[in-house]
Amino acid sequence: MASFSSRIDIPPVTKNLLVINIMLWLVEFIFPGFAERTLLPRLGPHYIGSDLFNPAQLFTYMFLHDPSGITHIFFNMFSLWMFGRILERVWGGKRYLLFYLVCGVGAAFAQEAVWAMTWRHEYIQGIAALNGLTYDHMQQIVDQATAAGDSGFLAGMADMKSRMMTVGASGAIFGLLLGFAFVFPNMPLYLFFIPVPIKAKYMVIGYAVLEFFFGVQGGGTIAHFAHLGGMLFGLAMMLYWKKKGTLHGNGYY
């Protein structure tokens, strides 16, 4: 049985993830111009159809956060500390890090898929509103202009694609939440705004339902389907490890 001090100590992988994320956020916060012109455009994942896309961004984006405030980084790092330190002790550092990174990259793939399915619709919807036209009428105009190689429309599409970008560790964090619920399904957890404990398995289901609902609703700046993507990739790993009989790893927690 682990001592009390070992339970509150932060194991090495979780500690390093916390340090990397917080240090990069401090750079973004202290040097907002550098972050906006260089750091975010180069390391944040752009839509794959954009000229700014780089495959490495599917990995690097999960270490960046919104530099305009502390809420994004705080809740992600609090969740990383809360769930990550326990899972690292259960699985060991290497397996835990693999799980974290796979969930993060999986979230990026999910977001890329959503962009691929929705960018054209959002582009047409946006310019239709600006021009006071119906969606169908605007779609016909865009189709004709695209077929004719109209430079104005093509430039507008390229500009929209270049603006499609997201950052944050949330996809990996949602994967950790699912992993925790898989390993400790009946562990009671508390939410900030709910004064009664909720079993981890029910909390994960609730989060997934809410993310799907808000994702379908659209709008806003939160990548809800990326969160779900992190959970789905995490679920795939959990089921694989469960099938092999190695779900609880070789940790000491």
Image (spheres, rainbow, N blue to C red):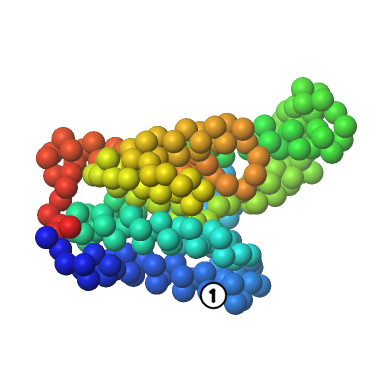
The vertical placement of 208 against 249, above or below, is above
Q: Quadrant of residue 5?
A: bottom left
- In the image shown, does 224 or 164 lie closer to the viewer? 224
The vertical placement of 62 against 182, above or below, is below
The vertical placement of 170 against 39, above or below, is above
Give the quadrant of the C terminus: bottom left
Residue 107, x across and y down, in percent: 43, 45
Query: Could you tell me the amino acid type at mark 1?
Result: Val
Residue sitting at the far top? 136
Residue sitting at the far bottom? 30
Residue 118 in sight: no
Q: Quadrant of residue 218?
A: top right
Residue 155, x across and y down, in percent: 73, 47
Circle count: 1
Residue sitting at the far front? 195
Q: Residue at x 16, y 35 (%)?
A: 243
- In the image shown, does 143 or 34 lie closer to the viewer? 34
Residue 252, x across and y down, in percent: 14, 59
Write down the residue under mark 1. Answer: 27
Q: Residue at x 36, y 62 (%)?
A: 81
Q: Residue at x 23, y 36 (%)?
A: 239
Residue 250 in sight: yes
Q: Secondary structure at mark 1?
A: helix
Q: Residue at x 74, y 45 (%)?
A: 156
Residue 171, x across and y down, in percent: 43, 49
Q: Is residue 147 left or right of residue 129?
A: left
Give the quadrant of the N terminus: bottom left
- In the image shown, does 138 or 107 lie closer to the viewer? 107
**Mark 1, other Cα within 10 Å: few <14 / some 14–19 / many ≥20:** some
- In the image shown, does 227 or 120 lie closer to the viewer? 227
Q: Is residue 172 left or right of residue 35?
A: left
